[in-house]
Image (cartoon, rainbow, N blue to C red):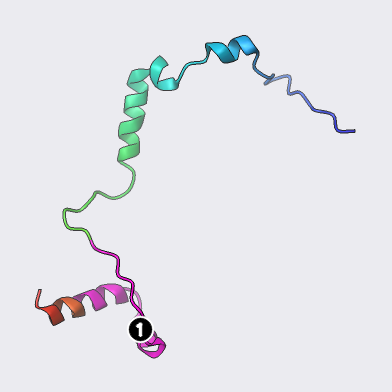
Amino acid sequence: MFRKKIDLDNPPLTDMQLSNMRPFKDVFPELAAQDEAERRKIGRPRKDVTKSRLSMRVDSDVMEKIKALGPGYQTKVNNWLREMVGV
């Protein structure tokens, strides 16, 4: 039969303890606001001009040639497309 182990250093919470719990942001609003601000800083800064995702089908031999250009091939294709449409 399976016996449930109880961690004496971390016992289960009582019903009274559970009923007294409040959200972190209610107890420490300053820290919660600071934490939220820090979370927004993660990652690189947003750019004014963003890119659009493109999904299209091309022949596999064409894709092989494009990928053979090495790292940065997507940027090169983007630059080719800009030239073609005159942007």
The residue that mark 1 highlights is 58
Q: Position of residue 12 (x, y in %)?
A: 68, 19
Residue 48 to residue 80: above or below? above
- The quadrant in which residue 69 appears is bottom left
Residue 59 located left or right of residue 1? left
Residue 32 located left or right of residue 49? right
Q: Nearer the viewer, residue 62 or 30?
A: 62
Residue 38 located left or right of residue 81? right
Residue located 9% across and 78% down the image: 86
The part of the chain drawn in magenta is 51-79
Q: Position of residue 32 (x, y in %)?
A: 37, 24
Q: Is residue 66 magenta?
A: yes
- Most distant residue in the bottom direction: 61
Residue 69 to residue 27: above or below? below
- Most distant residue in the left direction: 86
Residue located 73% across and 19% down the image: 8
- The quadrant in which residue 67 appears is bottom left
Q: Position of residue 62 (x, y in %)?
A: 35, 88
Q: Nearer the viewer, residue 24 or 68?
A: 24
Q: Is residue 35 magenta?
A: no
Q: Amino acid at mark 1?
A: Val
Q: Quadrant of the N terminus?
A: top right
Q: Position of residue 16 (x, y in %)?
A: 61, 9
Q: Nearer the viewer, residue 54 or 32?
A: 54
- The quadrant in which residue 17 appears is top right
